Image (spheres, helix red, strand yellow):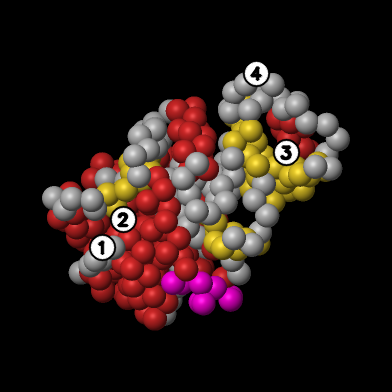
């Protein structure tokens, strides 16, 4: 941890009625995340300070404080309904779930769920279980109406504008922008079709990467609901499928979700949202990675392969 991060962690923990503890740094992306170890248990501390270059501008349509409060309400809601372990929020000394530090940065403390994040090099056997987990999450979240992000036509429009900006800044080429916009047009069309289908939408996690899924003694458990929002059930399946490169795992996700949820998932719609997941990454993070060779190579691979499968 840097000196600044250590100071933030120390100030954050002063808001909670906990005694002697040990703090282990976990990661810093959209949040500073640490494990807080006490004699009688452990917690996860999240400080909402994105690392330099980590952009959340696509999601800045709802006040951060409202989104954080909505996430805490969602975790409490799931803790009473979900078949998997949930990181339950802990109240601070004032009885609030969100603490505000001296410089306005917000944080929360959650109960630790014991487990290990999925290892991407050994995650193939879990594809079907991830599809089942997504269905269980959607069922458990049914009826929740708190403040969350919206994965809708408006987000697609903001992504179009950001891709235009990326092209103007020469972070992507005109040809690449044209392919990306064509895929977004198709996703927008898929959304329109699904809008007319009853029960096609749900509260979704929207970020079930391997690092956000724990393997626990009770099965798989999702963590980090900061990007959760109201979207499409097939969107969750497509975003899950983006974790895998082989069709067999992607199909296993779809089939297991269908069995657990009792609905049919359109393969083309799922492929469209798989591409949408990649486009979200490009639109949100091009400023951060455009100089990297792997990003340029990936853009060529995505626009010449994956995205073509949607068109």
Q: Magenta includes 301?
A: no
Per the model, the C-alpha gap separating discs 1 and 3 is 46 Å
Q: Magenta includes 123?
A: yes
Whether residues under marks 2 and 4 lie with C-beta atoms below 8 angstroms apart, the answer is: no
SS for tag 2?
helix
Give the residue number, with chain letter if any, for mark 4.
Answer: 94
Residue 100, how many percent across, how many down?
Answer: 62, 24
Give the residue number, with chain letter if any, for mark 3.
Answer: 5
Q: Is residue 35 above or below residue 301?
A: above
Badge 1: how crowded within 10 Å, few (<14), some, or many (20+)? some
Residue under the point 63% across and 39% down: 110
Q: Is residue 106 above or below residue 57?
A: above
Closer mark to the observer between disc 2 and disc 1: 1
The circle drawn on residue 233 is: 2
Residue under the point 64% across and 51% down: 113
Q: Which is more N-terminal, label 1 or label 2?
A: 2
Q: Which is more N-terminal, label 4 or label 2?
A: 4
SS for tag 1?
loop
Return the residue nearer the eye: 292 or 75: 75
Closer mark to the observer between disc 3 and disc 4: 4
The circle drawn on residue 263 is: 1
Residue under the point 35% across and 34% down: 145
Q: Is residue 95 above or below residue 231?
A: above
Whether residues under marks 2 and 1 lie with C-beta atoms below 8 angstroms apart, the answer is: yes
């Amino acid at each position: 941890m840097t000196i600044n991060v250590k100071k933030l962690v120390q100030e954050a923990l002063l808001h909670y009625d906990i005694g002697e503890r040990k703090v282990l740094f976990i990661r810093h992306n959209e949040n500073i995340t640490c494990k807080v170890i006490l004699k009688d248990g452990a917690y996860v501390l999240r400080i909402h300070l994105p690392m330099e270059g980590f952009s959340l501008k696509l999601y800045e349509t709802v006040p951060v404080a409202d989104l954080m409060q909505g996430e805490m309400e969602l975790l409490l809601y799931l803790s009473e309904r979900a078949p998997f372990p949930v990181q339950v929020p802990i109240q601070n000394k004032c009885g609030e779930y969100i603490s505000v530090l001296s410089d306005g940065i917000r944080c929360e403390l959650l109960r630790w769920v014991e487990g290990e994040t999925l290892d991407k090099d050994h995650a193939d056997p879990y594809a079907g279980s991830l599809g089942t987990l997504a269905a269980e999450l959607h069922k458990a979240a049914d009826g929740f109406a708190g403040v969350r992000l919206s994965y809708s036509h408006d987000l697609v429009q903001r992504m179009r504008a950001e891709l235009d900006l990326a092209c103007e800044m020469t972070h992507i080429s005109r040809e690449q922008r044209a392919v990306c916009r064509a895929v977004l047009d198709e996703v927008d069309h898929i959304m329109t079709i699904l809008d007319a289908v009853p029960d096609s939408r749900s509260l979704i996690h929207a970020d079930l990467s391997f690092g956000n899924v724990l393997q626990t003694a009770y099965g798989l458990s999702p963590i980090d609901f900061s990007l959760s929002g109201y979207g499409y059930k097939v969107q969750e399946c497509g975003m899950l499928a983006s974790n895998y490169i082989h069709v067999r795992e992607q199909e296993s996700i779809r089939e297991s979700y269908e069995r657990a949820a009792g609905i049919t998932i359109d393969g083309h719609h799922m492929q469209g949202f798989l591409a949408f997941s990649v486009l979200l990454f490009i639109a949100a993070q091009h400023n951060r990675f455009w100089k990297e060779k792997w990003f340029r190579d990936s853009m060529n691979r995505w626009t010449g392969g994956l995205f073509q499968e949607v068109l």
